[in-house]
Image: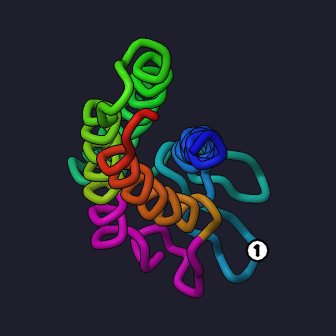
Amino acid sequence: MLVLLASIFVVHIATVIMLFVSTIANVWVVSDLGTGSVGLWKNCTTGGCGDLSYAGEDALKAVQAFMILSIIFSVISLVVFVFQLFTMEKGNRFFLSGATMLVCWLCVMVGASIYTHHYANGSINNYEPSHHGYSFILTWICFCFSFIIGILYLVLRKK
């Protein structure tokens, strides 16, 4: 049981780190020509980084907000898990940690889905031959991890 809790804790920390990296890094869409990449905050080319041409769009602001919320809920869930680990009575489940992590999962899903629908094809960035960058891929990996962690928290009992 201790090994399971420790492994969940490690995966949870990895998920928080990956959420930070995927939200901060400007590598959501990458040009196939190697001339630049686009993130949630900046458009980076070989000459440097500048503002996005569509920075004022509501869809992008929603993606930014949901990704920041996912980081916040993931950190809160981690803190609640550690708190519950040391204060909760034996036999109880980690309901609060699981529920908070599932809210994180929901935020990641909404943010990544909006970005996928509006911006993932690269045409709006003038990077027509393009592919998904590591930030975009990390976001979908965090989507899977946060769901698994949230369900495991709901199922696990403190022994």
The vertical placement of 29 against 10, above or below, is: below
Residue 33 place in picture, x, y as percent? 73, 81
Report the front residue among 108 and 94: 94
The vertical placement of 21 against 100, above or below, is: below
The magenta stretch spans residue 121: yes
User: Which region of the structure is painted magenta?
Assistant: 112-132
Residue 59 place in picture, x, y as percent? 24, 53
Q: Is residue 82 left or right of residue 3?
A: left
The vertical placement of 85 against 92, above or below, is: above
Tell me the kind of residue under disc 1.
Gly
Report the front residue among 79 and 3: 3
Residue at screen point 66% across, 53% down: 44
The vertical placement of 120 against 40, above or below, is: below
Residue at screen point 63% across, 70% down: 30
Report the front residue among 3 and 24: 3
Residue 61 place in picture, x, y as percent? 29, 43
Q: List the single residue furthest toward the top.
A: 87
Q: Is residue 28 left or right of residue 34?
A: left
Q: List the single residue furthest toward the bottom.
A: 129
Crowdedness near tag 1: few (<14), some (14–19) or many (≥20) residues, C-alpha within 10 Å:
few
Q: Is residue 137 visible?
A: yes
Residue at screen point 27% across, 62% down: 114
Per the image, the residue denoted by label 1 is 34
